[in-house]
Amino acid sequence: MLVAIIIIIILGVISGYFIIPTSLLEYLDLISTISLSILLLGVGIDIGRNKEVITDLKRLGFKIILVPTLIAIGSIAGAILFGILIKLPVNESSAIAAGFGWYSLSAVILTKTYSTDIGALAFLSNVFRELFALVLIPLLAKMGTKLTVIAPGGATTMDTTLPLITKSVNDTEIAIIAFISGAVLSAFVPILVPLLI
């Protein structure tokens, strides 16, 4: 799967640069939305078929919120430490990390409220987070505990990386925790990014 993901991304870059006419680019967002919707429908059907999931979630209770909370703390703390190394102010590095992979929203917030440069950096950082997540999720699924596959995706675990997580761990409970984590982190983005900057 890892090789397939890398090949598909490379093919996408080559197609976008050399093959796809500019006139078709306006439909790319619609095609992506439809494709993602079909993938999420499949994940939903798989979750719905497993009758024990609701029981498992009741058993986990409030602890399920710890996953996105710890991902948020780790992401922001790591960005602050790295920001210190490259002499980036704490408010900027923490706000960039608080995008949690949601590159479109965090970049727009920072561009409009702070600076175009930091908005561009937020965009690139969060795009790379999603790309690294696509590579890391299958590797982490093979190497460690199933829960670790949720962290790299950040906010994207409720949409774009959810199908990959589901396929990589083949565990409906982890898929639900990933979805909830992504939803919580997505809710954090419009609050934390302006607050931290």
Image (cartoon, helix red, strand yellow):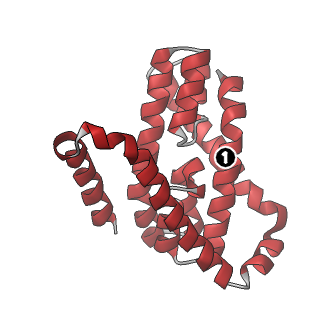
> Measured from the top left, where is residue 99 in percent x and y?
58, 36
> Measured from the top left, where is residue 138 in percent x and y?
42, 66
Give the residue drawn at x 58%, y 15%. Answer: 114
> Measured from the top left, where is residue 185 in percent x and y?
66, 46
| Residue annotated with mark 1 | 185
Q: Is residue 32 visible?
A: yes
Q: Residue furthest front?
A: 23
Q: Quadrant of the N terminus?
A: bottom left
Is 28 or 67 nearer to us in this picture?
A: 28
Residue 13 position (above or below residue 138):
above
Left or right of 18 on screen, residue 167 = right
Left or right of 193 on screen, residue 149 = left
Binning the other alpha carbons within 10 Å of mark 1 as few (below 14), some (14 to 19) or many (20 upward) gives many
Left or right of 114 on screen, residue 129 = left
For residue 111, which quarter of the picture?
A: top right
Residue 25 position (above or below residue 84):
below
Give the residue drawn at x 57%, y 69%. Answer: 41
Q: Residue furthest left?
A: 18
Give the residue drawn at x 55%, y 51%. Answer: 156
Give the residue drawn at x 48%, y 38%. Answer: 126
Q: Is residue 87 visible?
A: no
Tell me the element at label 1. helix
Q: Quadrant of the C terminus?
A: top right
Residue 134 position (above or below residue 197):
below
Mark 1: amino acid:
Leu
For residue 48, which quarter of the picture?
A: bottom right
Residue 123 position (above or below residue 60):
above
Number of numbered labels in the structure image: 1
